[in-house]
Amino acid sequence: MKQGIHPKYYDVEARCACGATWRTRSTRPDLVLEICSNCHPFFTGRQKLVDTEGRVERFTKKFGAQTVAGRRRKRAEPGKAGAGA
């Protein structure tokens, strides 16, 4: 291997925004993360909705809180579905 072309590796304490820490190696002397496996929705099974400028409320106001069960109930109501045909 050539000398002087490889980055220096540091033993660092990685810190996440949620407060989790662990030891690892990195080419940077300080490692701060925004999200990790302790707080990511894919790994935790919990979903955090980050509402930017009321987009979730606007969507639910426009389309309503639609679910599969709600659509089935709407189809099953007499006089509602296909009454004009």
Image (cartoon, rainbow, N blue to C red):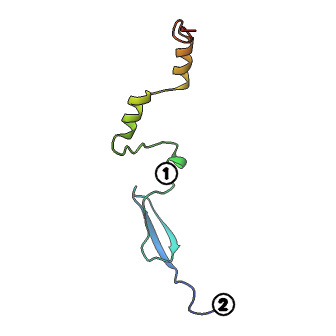
| Along the line of sight, the residue nearer the viewer: 58 or 65 | 58
Q: Earlier in the sequence, mark 2 or mark 1?
A: 2
Quick one: which residue is furthest to the right in this view? 1
Residue type of the residue flagged with mark 2: Met
Percent coordinates x, y for residue 61 in the rendering = 38, 29
Dot 1 alpha-carbon crowd within 10 angstroms: few under 14, some 14 to 19, many 20 or more: some
Q: In which quarter of the image is the N terminus?
A: bottom right
Instruction: State the residue position of label 2.
Output: 1
Task: Identify the residue at image location x=57%, y=85%.
Answer: 6
Q: What residue type is labelled 1?
A: His
- Please provide percent x and percent y for residue 40: 49, 51
Question: Which of the 4 image quadrants contains residue 53?
Answer: top left
Q: Position of residue 69 (x, y in %)?
A: 54, 21
**Alpha carbon distance from label 2 to label 1:** 38 Å
Circle 1 residue: 40
Question: Is 50 on the left-hand or right-hand side of 46?
Answer: left
Residue at (39, 58) in percent of width and height: 17
Secondary structure at numbered mark 1: loop
Above or below 13: residue 69: above
Identify the residue at horizontal 37%, vertical 35% (top origin): 58
Of 41 and 85, the residue lying toward us: 85
Is the residue 13 above or below the residue 73 in the image?
below
